Image (spheres, rainbow, N blue to C red):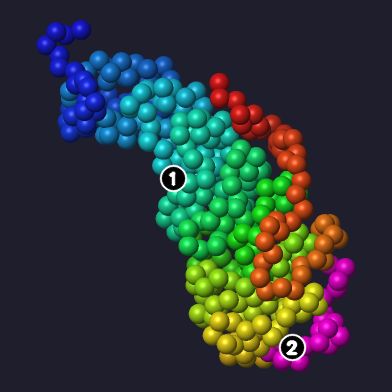
């Protein structure tokens, strides 16, 4: 070692180093290091790393150097290269800084080994990340990929935590809103879902109402199931399914959460029926009325669902709500009851406008992990507790 070389030490060493500029020679080595990662050559990466580490440490900026390591890590993710990824995280203070882009790339490529590696190095999969168009836990971006969704769920991702502290909207809210029914089923039937959180029945009211992906951010389109535009038939099934798991058919939105439902036009404390009326979802309105929803419950501003429907131009819905009796609703219904799923657990939704305390639906023990592997896919690893 060069006796004249000054190496920062003590608790402020990294802070001192972070204020130094990277010399051109080191930048060239780091660029070569990134290119070697792109090429998948761990041998070349090691060769470039030697002079980087041997260069006088007083000239290395940890923050800037780690940016190159983060770029190299992205190349490793895109090329499914676990060994390079592991090598990068072994480099102490220079290891990659995990960003939402890394997580998105690993999720898109189903790089389960790399996702596990990120977890071992401090990634909290339940922490909300800023993805540009939404701030959300990563599992909310797996709605179009059931295999990935299940891996995240079985690995410890929560679906019941609020995405924002003051709004009762959870990843499970997004699941019932967007995802295929089988993903809703696995959440409940394996004991992960809490029916009391996320205003789940309200979010089902949106299913089947989207005619195109116009205006939906590209990343959101990638996160959504390919069939999300054709989910009207799932709406009625999920109403019955959630009611069977203990959802309150007349449960009302709190004032803060109401603000995220633009169709309510400021009407707080709306029931699922009220929201369905505001959305023009006549099939859901009929189905809820048949299941015992109360059309006389007013919103906080004193309006009935029929008033809201009429004001929004949904005359048929307004008439149905104004004159509804169980017999009339049944006679007007054009919905084939056999189209509703018979796979939901037995149960009913109740008629109280306050969610019952402690009613989280039938609970089951978590089933053993069941691998969902596509033939020839060696990149999927179900041993999520293996930290070796």
Q: Which residue position is annotated with label 1?
A: 100
Q: Residue at horizontal 51%, vertical 63%?
A: 167
Task: Assess disc 2: are there few (<14), some (14-19) or many (≥20) residues with their C-alpha within 10 Å of its C-alpha.
Answer: some
Return the residue nearer the eye: 323 or 359.
359
Say which quarter of the image contains residue 276: bottom right
Residue 84: numbered disc:
none
Mark sitting earlier along the chain (2/1): 1
Q: Residue at label 2?
A: 320
Secondary element at image label 2:
helix
Pick whichever, 14 or 116, lies toward us. Answer: 14
Helix, strand or loop status at disc 1 = helix
* Residue 321 is inside the magenta segment: yes
Q: Is residue 103 magenta?
A: no
Q: Which of the 4 image quadrants contains residue 99?
A: top left
Q: Is any part of residue 320 visible from this angle?
A: yes
Q: Nearer the viewer, residue 97 or 156?
A: 156
Q: Residue at x 18, y 33 (%)?
A: 19
Q: In the picture provided, is 86 more to the left or to the right than 352?
A: left
Q: Position of residue 290 (x, y in %)?
A: 81, 78
Residue 310: give x, y in percent of width and height: 62, 91
Stretch of the chain drawn in magenta: 317-339
Could you classify mark 1 by the number of other residues whose Cα lies within 10 Å: few (under 14), some (14-19), or many (20 or more)?
some
Quadrant in the picture for the N terminus: top left
What secondary structure do most residues of the magenta stretch adopt?
helix
Q: Is residue 76 left or right of residue 334?
A: left
Task: Give me the residue at 55% from left, 82% from top.
Answer: 300
């Amino acid at each position: 070692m060069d006796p004249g070389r000054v190496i920062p030490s003590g608790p402020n060493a990294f802070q001192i180093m972070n204020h130094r500029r990277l010399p051109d020679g080191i930048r060239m080595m780091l660029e070569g290091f990134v290119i070697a990662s792109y090429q998948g050559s761990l041998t070349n990466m090691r060769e470039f790393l030697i002079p980087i580490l041997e260069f006088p440490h007083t000239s290395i900026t940890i923050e800037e150097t780690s940016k190159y390591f983060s770029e190299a890590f992205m190349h490793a993710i895109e090329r499914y290269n676990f060994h390079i990824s592991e090598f990068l995280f072994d480099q102490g203070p220079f290891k990659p800084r995990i960003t939402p882009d890394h997580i998105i790339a690993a999720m898109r490529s189903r790089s389960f080994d790399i996702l596990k590696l990120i977890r071992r190095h401090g990634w909290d999969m339940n922490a909300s990340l800023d993805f540009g168009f939404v701030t959300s836990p990563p599992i909310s971006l797996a709605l179009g990929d059931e295999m990935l969704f299940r891996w995240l769920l079985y690995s410890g991702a929560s679906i019941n935590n609020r995405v924002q502290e003051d709004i009762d909207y959870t990843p499970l809210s997004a699941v019932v809103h967007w995802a295929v029914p089988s993903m809703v089923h696995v959440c409940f039937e394996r004991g992960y879902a809490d029916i009391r959180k996320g205003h789940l029945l309200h979010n089902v009211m949106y299913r089947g109402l989207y005619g195109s992906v116009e205006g939906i951010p590209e990343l959101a389109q990638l996160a959504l199931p390919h069939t999300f535009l054709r989910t009207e038939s799932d709406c009625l099934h999920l109403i019955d399914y959630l009611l069977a798991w203990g959802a309150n058919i007349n449960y009302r939105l709190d004032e803060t959460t109401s603000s995220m439902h633009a169709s309510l036009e400021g009407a707080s404390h709306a029931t699922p029926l009220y929201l369905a009326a505001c959305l023009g979802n006549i099939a859901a309105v009929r189905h809820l009325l048949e299941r015992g929803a109360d059309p006389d419950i007013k919103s906080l501003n004193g309006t009935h669902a029929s008033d809201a429907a009429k004001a929004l131009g949904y005359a048929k819905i307004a008439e149905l709500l104004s004159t509804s009796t169980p017999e009339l609703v049944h006679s007007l219904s054009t919905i084939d009851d056999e189209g509703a799923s018979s796979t939901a657990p037995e149960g009913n939704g109740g008629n109280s406008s306050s969610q019952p305390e402690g009613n989280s639906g039938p609970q089951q023990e978590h089933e053993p992990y069941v691998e969902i592997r596509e033939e020839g896919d060696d990149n999927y690893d179900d041993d999520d507790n293996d930290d070796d």
